[in-house]
Amino acid sequence: MLYDLFDTEITPLFASVLLGIGLGALFGAAAQISRFCLRRGVVEGPERSQAAGVWLTALIVAVLGTQLTVWRGGLDFSEHRFFVSEIPALAIAVGGLLFGAGMVLTRGCVSRLTVLSATGNLRAATVLVVFSIVAHATLKGLLAPIRVSAGSVTVDTGVVSLADLPGGAPLWTAAIVVGLGAIVWRSGARPLHLALAAVIGALVPLGWFGTGIFLFDDFDPIALNSLSFTAPWADTLFWSVASSAVPAGFGVGLVGGVLVGSFLSAAARGELELQSFDAPRQTLRYVSGAGLMGFGGVLAGGCTVGAGLSGVPTLSFAAVLALLAIIVGARITDRVLDRAPSGAAVPAE
C-alpha cells in the first residue's frame, strides 16, 4: 500500500524496522507503567486478579482489532506458520509447558524481562542473554535437530482456525471478547492500567496491518509479523554480532523500541534502579528458567506475546493451544515452588 501511494526509496525491510521501533517504544512505555505480564496474572499472589485483568484487556483489544482488519482490510493469515491443519502437538505442548515453567523461575515472561532490563534490572538482562542464545540454538544451532524431531509429531485436526468451526470468526470472536470481558470486569484492575493495556492490545493489529498490508510489496516482500519476542530476541542477538552480514528487520526494531520506550518511561517516573543477583542459587534458578523459555518458546511457536497476545487474535488453533500450555506450565511450576523449602525464595522483580 505504501508503495502504491508514495514514490519512496525506503525499502520495505527498512520501513519494517522503523515500524518495529515505533510499536516497540509504545509497548515498552505502556508495559513499564502497567507492569504488563502474563505471569503475574497466572501465579498465586495479591495482585493476580488485577494483573490478569490488564493482560486480558490487551488480548480483547487485539482480538477485536485483528479480526476487524481481516474483515475490512483483507489481511490474510493463510500462509502464516500458525495456520497449519497438521498441528505439531508434541512441540507445542512440551514447549508451552517449558516456557511456562521458565517464566515462573525467572519471575517474568520475556516481554516483562525486556522492560525490566531497560530499567536497570541486571537479573532480567542476564536472563535475556541466555534466552536469546538458547532460542537461536534451537532455531538454527545445536538444538535444532530436537526441534525438528518434536515438530514432526503432528495431529491432523482438520481445522487451522477457530473460524473453521461452526459459527465462524464472528461467533468465536464474540465468545472470546464476552468471556474475557467478564473476567476483566471482576478483576478490580486500575483504570489507568486497563487503558494502557488497551493501547498494548491495539499495537497487535497495527503490527499485522503494517507488515501484511501497508508495507506489502510484490517485488520485495517481508514477513508477516506483529508483536513477539522469541524470534526477535534471537534475531537481535544474531544481528548484534553479524550486522554487516545480516540486516535488521521488524523484530530487531521491535526489541530496540521496547528497550528505549521502557527506559524513557522509567526515567521519567524515577524508577531506574540497578538490581542484581543476591546468591549463586538465585542465579542458577534464573539461568535455568531462561534456558527453558528459550527452548520452549521456539518449540511452542512463540512466547506469551508472540503465540498469545498476537497469535490468539488470528484465531489460530495452534496459538490457542500454545497459550494454554504456557499457562498450565506456569501454574504447575508455581505450585511446585510453593512446596519447596523457604531457601528457594527469590526477591520480587
Image (cartoon, grey):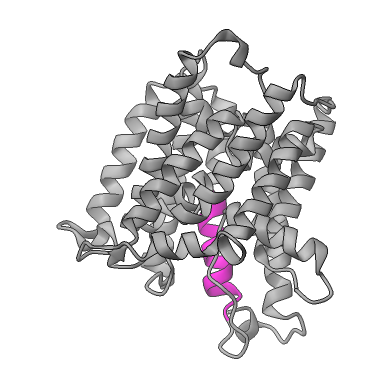
Residue 12 vs residue 40: left or right?
A: right
Left or right, 6 with reference to 48: right
Q: Residue at x 58, y 67 (%)?
A: 210
Residue 16 in magenta stretch: no
Specify the principal SS of the magenta part: helix
Task: Using the rendered view, name the quadrant where residue 35 is placed.
Answer: top right
Residue 163 versus residue 64 in the image, above or below: below
Q: Is residue 210 magenta?
A: yes
Indicate the quadrant where residue 150 lies: bottom left
Q: Is residue 326 left or right of residue 108?
A: left
Residue closer to the observer: 249 or 20: 249
| Residue stretch in magenta | 202-216
Residue 328, given in percent of the width and then of the height, sits at 37, 34
- Percent position of residue 5, x then y: 63, 82
Q: Quarter holding the C terminus?
A: top right
**Residue 343, relative to residue 100: is it above or below?**
above
Q: Is residue 54 left or right of residue 245?
A: left
Instruction: Name the quadrant of the N terminus.
Output: bottom right
In the displayed structure, 106 sits above or below 323; it is: above
Q: Nearer the viewer, residue 288 or 206?
A: 288
Q: Residue 95's spot in the image, x, y percent?
A: 44, 48
Q: Give coordinates of residue 31: x percent, y percent.
A: 64, 37
The residue closer to the viewer here, 126 or 253, is 126
Residue found at the far top of this picture:
342
The residue at the point 51 percent across, 13 percent down is 46
Q: Is residue 82 something that shows in the picture?
A: no
Asked which quadrant contains residue 2, the reply is bottom right
- The furthest residue to the bottom: 219
Is 98 drawn above or below residue 245 in the view shown?
above
Q: Count every numbered label the image shows and give the total.
A: 0
* Whether residue 230 is visible: yes
